[in-house]
Image: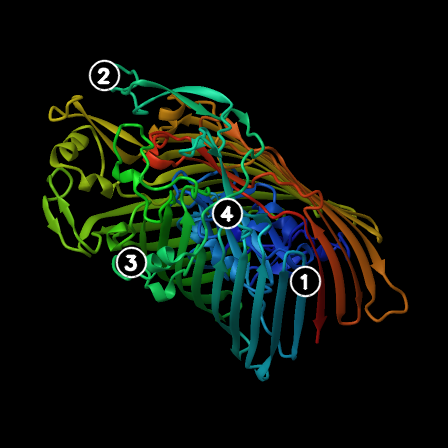
Amino acid sequence: MTGKYKLQFASTLSGIAIAASLTAAPAMAQDTGGDIIVTARKTGEDILKVPVTVTAITSETLDAKGIVSVTDMAASTPGININNSSSGHADRSFQQVVMRGMTPSTTLATTTSMFIDGVAVSSPSQVSAISNPERVEIIKGPQSAYFGRNTFAGAINVVTKMPGNDWGGEVLGMLGTRNNWRLRGSIEGPIIPDLLSFRINGEQYSRDGSWKNQDGVTLGDQQTKSASLLLAITPASNVTIKLFGMLSEDKDGPSAQTRLYSYDVKAPNGSTVVQGQANCILTGDTRGVLNPVTGLPAGAAVQNPYFCGTIPTMANPVTANVTNTDFVRQFLNIGTNRIVDPSEGVQGYGLLRRTKHAHATFDWEATDKLTISALAGYNREVWTTFIDLDSYDGSALPSGYDYNGNGRIDATEIFGEGYFNYPYLIERKIDDFSLEGRLSYVSGRFHGVAGISYLSADQLQGLGGGTGALTASSLSPGGLSRNKTTGLFFGLTYDVTDTISASFEGRYQIDQLQAFARPSGVSVASSAFIPAGFYTGGTVLASAKYKNFTPRAIVNWQITPDTMVYVSWAKGVNPAQFNTNILSQVGSVQQAAFDAGGELAIKPEKITNYEIGLKGRIGSTLRYTFAAYYAQWRNQINSTIIVAPDATQPTGYSFVTASMNAGSVNLRGIEGEASWRPTEFLTIDAAGAINDSDIKAFASSTVSALTGIYDYSGKEMKNTSKYSANVGVQVGTEISGWDKGSWFVRGDWNFKSGVWSNEANLARTPDLHLFNARAGITRGNLSLEAFVNNIFNNKTPLTISDNYTLSPGFVYAARTSALMLGLGDLRTAGVQAKIKF
């Protein structure tokens, strides 16, 4: 097959070929008619001939838009949301990537995974820590065949820059409002010409938060340091070895978050501490689950003030108890019952995270038809975050007052700091390593790849706190969770004609999941699920093995040299979970749960995805890509309550909280990108997505207890924007008489429609419109820029989740009674300079 119709498909990974983004103005500005080619696993590919929905944001675009985090990237990419709101905090310790509306069904679940040079990493924070990458690749749709587990909705891969044989480097500095600054430097060059070269990157950025607490402390302060070293070894013309290592640290202050409360909280003197803003009354019930015999709610009906429609603006000031008192410091210095040693942990309100990453890649072009590749990676992430769980200033609520009005002082009305406050510590430690070997073969019309991969990951989590005295007994370290995954994968592509190709890919995956007893041990009172007895710390409580095959088929047709259409079908699998909390129940409850069909190990989630895409160009000025998809998400994991007949209980039933495969969702959407350069002076980039979801089945005792809703059919997924769009307009040209002289002015509009707080679809955030502007001038190796982000100072919350109004006596904590809001950055202006050498 020869000529312009020849299709350069990735013989190694045809389904995850990466190309430069259509929305990346600096990459597009030179000539929208030329091919955009990048190297994806040693194969050059044109974005307009890759049969998959993919976007790549180049290093130049990251700088031009001031993108330094996954959150920034999602804001400028349609079809992606970042949810950082969970369990009473909205900060960088928790970042769920929601792609194509596939919101993870639990806080510990993941539907989109992160990679560096194709090597899996633990969390989005490590992707954000990469300084000055070659590009960031966003691949949508199930990627299980090659990327493996947790790529249910897609994958994000950061490609690092390869050093060359010439010495070079750059220094970038930025100064902005609210003590916003950034300093980045890199240097590269040959150690041994044509054999060994290196690249060193270092970066630090810091900023004060946009929001002020009642005591004047800014909320949302962030600081990140990172350093990396890359060595490229080329012992022969057909062998490339890449060694990469990175260290990073995030050190943040109290997070920028607040709540909308359903109830007033009053001080003993009658003054209002926080004002309730509920705008509707919901009829829920005390259980949130249906009686399996009668089909009616198992609890008593209750009236719940809450929020309906677009949420109101905040009536209360952003306020929290975040003063680092001696009481706080002594608690954080406790070493007993900790997952993370106090010397490695946060020293006050905020977040401390340290990560280590290392990987190696090896590519050997053994013949002109066969390439042998190997990858190995290691990650370690340790973080602690310390939060005010009630999220308001409770200094007007003194200890020792009868808040419940029952004529006595209860234990919940005695406060350790002398006033109501709920300091809470959350900590996590993750270690993993991975290996992969791959053979790629090309012969005439046939392209093939086959390989094997292995991943081992350990995770520990601890937490604790309270309103009373804080001692070691206030801390609860969890048991180890471990997963080991082995995968065998392949990809076959055959060029049926000069214009039509067909691909079939697949992965056979074995997941071994294990859950271990917490350090203090676990007493199991029943043999319903595992043999009864005492399990010492570190003993295996649950173990399960899952075997799945995830295929993908693609057919693409190069209709003309400038137009390509493709169709694909794929299956994906998300790992299962354990219900180890059942084992802590009394014996009769465990047996009742078992008899009612409760499972210690639930099944993996599964998805089937259908997709059609169109890519092409019109003349030399316009590029476009469009894709439509339809996906069926089955066995969705939901957190609910098992209602188990139990004669030992007064009600005749036991109610056991557990995860179950109770959910089913259909998802559909349309996505498109285009870049138009009608003149040498003007470039217009546009992208948009409609990501619709249709819940067929769902179960949540928490949501049902609040709303009284049990039939969720026809509802939409939470924490995801149905509509999103970006438009960027850039004008600029070269400056005659200057060495490499040019100027530009650019404006961007980023849009995300509002997101629901839960699957009942009652409360949602307003639509989010962000406008940014940037202008710059370049002469020789020096560039100067000025920027304003969030020009109109939009205060719309970025994230939302159901939460509680926590008050003395916890009278409003039986059911959801507040909305947790994650707050974004307000208007920020600054200047940036970059010099290359």
- Tell me the distance, in whole angstroms, between the alpha carbons under discs 1 and 3: 39 Å
- Tell me the distance, in whole angstroms, between the alpha carbons under discs 2 and 4: 51 Å
Image spot of residue 41 (x, y percent)? 53, 61
Q: Are marks 1 and 4 in contact (CB under 8 Å)?
A: no
Q: Quadrant of the C terminus?
A: bottom right
Q: Which residue is mark 3?
A: 338
Which of the pair 651/360 is nearer the observer?
651
Tell me if residue 290 comes above or below residue 735 in the rendering.
above
Q: Which residue is mark 2?
A: 293
- Tell me the distance, in whole angstroms, between the alpha carbons under discs 3 and 2: 45 Å
- Tell me the distance, in whole angstroms, between the alpha carbons under discs 4 and 3: 50 Å
Would residue 168 be found to the left or right of residue 12 on screen? right
State the SS at label 4: strand
Q: Residues within 10 Å of mark 4 (few under 14, many from 20)?
A: many
1 or 2: tag closer to the N-terminus: 1
User: Outermost residue, right direction?
Assistant: 737
Q: Are marks 2 and 4 in contact (CB under 8 Å)?
A: no
Q: Which residue is mark 1?
A: 175
Image spot of residue 665 (x, y percent)? 43, 30
Q: Amino acid at mark 4?
A: Ser
Image spot of residue 354 (x, y percent)? 43, 63
State the SS at label 1: strand
State the SS at label 2: loop
Q: Which residue is mark 4?
A: 503
Tell me if residue 117 comes above or below residue 588 in the rendering.
below
